[in-house]
Amino acid sequence: GAVVSQHPSRVICKSGTSVKIECRSLDFQATTMFWYRQFPKQSLMLMATSNEGSKATYEQGVEKDKFLINHASLTLSTLTVTSAHPEDSSFYICSARAPMMNTEAFFGQGTRLTVV
Amino acid sequence: AQSVTQPDIHITVSEGASLELRCNYSYGATPYLFWYVQSPGQGLQLLLKYFSGDTLVQGIKGFEAEFKRSQSSFNLRKPSVHWSDAAEYFCAVRDSGGYQKVTFGTGTKLQVIP
């Protein structure tokens, strides 16, 4: 299957700082990428859907000013957690879908964010 | 709106025993269904998927799932569990239109005892 690379795999940051997570589709062009958040021992909750060249669509309850999503190219989407707080500590996973391919979306390996 | 229910939060089986993980979905049209496995601190690995055709789907690692429209179910099965199968299992349904969003169930944690 297609490969989605997520970076970094782990990051620790101080409260009040911002952290950027990258999601790259390595061998296909992804017009749509999805960002999920997973709390410990819970399921994946969709945060937002990003489309190349347009604004992201956020799910209800997700602060768009706090979780900035940019999908500037067909192979890269970024999630920036701004002014991070300890409650933002979580596991963030991205997935990418190729256009006109009736297949599953492909998932990155996730990023463990710890805010101290 | 689409939804997925995994009734069992935690299941314990003996190594070598058979396994069935339950999944029920709610979706207005023909669903696209998936089973994923997640090891601790890791991303998701696709076990199998159902889009159309044969309702019994074979996946990787000896897993299979059966789509039953009448029961709105997509249960995952394995005839003989290995210790390495211990992980979290997620059932998911994908929207057929729009951005094709994927909705996940709450997951079932599988413990395998010797």
Image: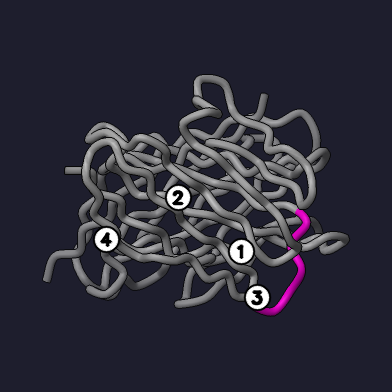
Cα separation between marks 4 and 1:
19 Å
Amino acid type, residue under disc 1 in the picture: Phe
Amino acid type, residue under disc 2 in the picture: Phe
Q: Which mark is residue B90?
A: 2
Image point (61%, 48%), residue name: A34
* In contact (CB < 8 Å): disc 1 and disc 2: no
Q: Which residue carries the number 3 mark?
A: A2
Q: Is residue B111 above or below residue A40?
A: below
In the rendered image, residue B39, in percent from the top left (x then y), is placed at 31, 64
- Local SS, label 2: strand
Q: Nearer the viewer, residue A69 or A35?
A: A69
Chain for disc number 3? A
Chain for disc number 4? B
Horizontally, residue B28 falls left or right of residue B108, namely right
Q: Say if labels 4 and 1 share a chain.
A: no
* In contact (CB < 8 Å): disc 3 and disc 1: yes
Q: Which mark is residue B40?
A: 4
Magenta segment includes A1:
no
Q: Which residue carries the number 1 mark?
A: A106
Mark closer to the chain start, 4 or 2: 4
Q: Nearer the viewer, mark 1 or mark 2?
A: 1
The quarter of the picture where the N terminus of chain B appears is top right
Cα separation between marks 4 and 3:
22 Å
- Neighbour tally class for label 4: few under 14, some 14-19, many 20 plus, Cα within 10 Å: few
Range covered by the magenta-colored residues: A26-31
Mark closer to the chain start, 3 or 1: 3
* In contact (CB < 8 Å): disc 4 and disc 2: no
